Image: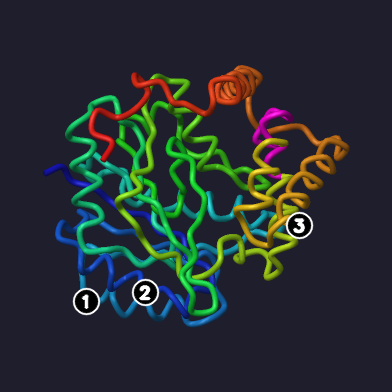
Amino acid sequence: MSNYVIITPAFNEEKYIESTIKSVLSQTIKPVSWIIVDDGSTDETGNIIKKYAEQYTWIKYLYRKKVAGQTYYGSNVYAIEEGLKIIENVDYEYLAILDADISLPPDYYARILSKFDKDNELGIASGVYIVRNNNRLEQVLNDRRSCPKNIMVFRQKCFMDINGFIPMKYGGEDTIACFMARMNGWKTWSFPDMVVIHNKPVGTGHSKSMLKIRFRLGIGEYFLATHPLFLLIKSLRRCFRETPFILGGILRLMGYIYACFMNEPRQISIDLIKFIQKEQLQRVFKGNKIPSEHQPKVSL
C-alpha cells in the first residue's frame, strides 16, 4: 500500500480538533507524517494539537501567525503551503488535505489509496461528507468530479502538475484544483460509498448566517468562472435540494450577479476559464452525463 502525508489547517477549532485527531489515530493505515498548522488560533486549538504531537512523533505542530488583509479562504491555503514546507524532504506518494472539524471512518485513507492503485490516471480523489447541524446529520449535494478540499487526496505528481492550490479570495480553490487537474489530463472523483462527517455546517468558518453563506457562494461562483447558464440551472436545482430552500438558491444567483458588477479581476487564466465553461456547457447539453473515459476504472 502506498504512503501518504496529511496537512491540516486549523483556526479556532477547539470544539472539533480532538475528534479529528482521534479519527486519524484510528486509521488502519497511518500517514508517514501529519502536519497540523495552527493558523493563528485564539482559543485552545494549539494546546490540544501540542498534546498529541508530544505523544506521536509523526504528528507535527506548526504555528502560523495570521496576516492582516488575507481572507478566510486565502489564509487557509497559505497555511497549507506552510505545512508543505515541512514535508519537502519526506518521501510520499499521496498528499491528503484534512480540515480540523472532520470525523473519518477508520478505513478512509486505506480505501482512498486503493482507488489510486487501481487507476494510474486518477489524480485527485475523496469521499463525500454529511454535515452535523444542531445534532442532526444532513446530506450535502456533491458533484462526482469535484473533491471537497476538507477531505481530498492528491497523487503527488498531479499536485505538482497543477502547482498546488490557488489562494482564491472568495473560495473554491478545491474546485479550481479539480478543473486544473482535468485540464492536465488527470481524472478527479468523489466516491459516494466513503462517507465522513463534517462536524459543523460548511462555510461557518467565515459566517454564521446560512443566508450570507449562500450569497457568498454565488460571489465565489463568478470568480470560479462558472458559466451563467450553468449557474442558473445549478441555482434553480438547489432551490429545492439545499437549505434554506428556495431562498438559498436565489441568494446564490444574486451573489453571482452582484459579483458581475464588482469590477474585480478573476485569479485564474483565460485558458482555464475557457476549459471550465466548455466542460460546464457539455454537462448542460448532455444531461450532466460524464463520459466513461473520464470516470475512474473502479468507481464504486
In the rendered structure, which amino acid carries the disc numbered 2?
Ile
Q: CA distance from mark 1 to mark 2?
A: 10 Å
Q: Which residue is mark 3?
A: 247
Mark 1 burial class by Cα count in 10 Å: few <14, some 14-19, many 20+? few
Residue ID for mark 2: 49
Q: Which mark is residue 64?
A: none
Colour convention of the picture: rainbow
> What's drawn in magenta, residue-wise?
220-231
Between 66 and 268, the one nearer to me in the picture:
268
In the figure, is residue 10 to the left or right of 42? left
* Position above or below: 162 against 142: above
Residue 234 % position (x, y): 65, 40
Q: Nearer the viewer, residue 160 or 141?
A: 141
- Whether pointer 3 and pointer 1 mark residues with C-beta atoms closer than 8 Å, the reply is no
Q: Is residue 121 magenta?
A: no
> Where does residue 132 sit, x and y in percent of width and height?
48, 71
180 up-or-down from 200: above or below: above
Query: Residue 184 lies in what quarter of the image?
Result: top left
- Count neighbours of disc 3 (C-alpha within 10 A) and say few if under 14, some if 14 to 19, many if 20 or more: some
Q: Identify residue type, mark 1.
A: Gln
Give the secondary structure at mark 1: loop
Marker disc for residue 55: 1
The residue that appears at 23% across and 33% down in the rendered structure is 298
Seen at 22% across and 69% down, the residue is 25
Classify the position of the C terminus by image quarter.
Answer: top left
Of marks 3 and 1, the one in the foreground: 3
Kindly check if marks 1 and 2 are in contact, taking CB atoms under 8 A apart as contact.
Answer: no
Q: Earlier in the sequence, mark 3 or mark 1?
A: 1
* Residue at (53, 73) in percent of width and height: 133
Secondary structure mostly seen in the magenta stretch: helix
Residue 32 to residue 42: above or below = above
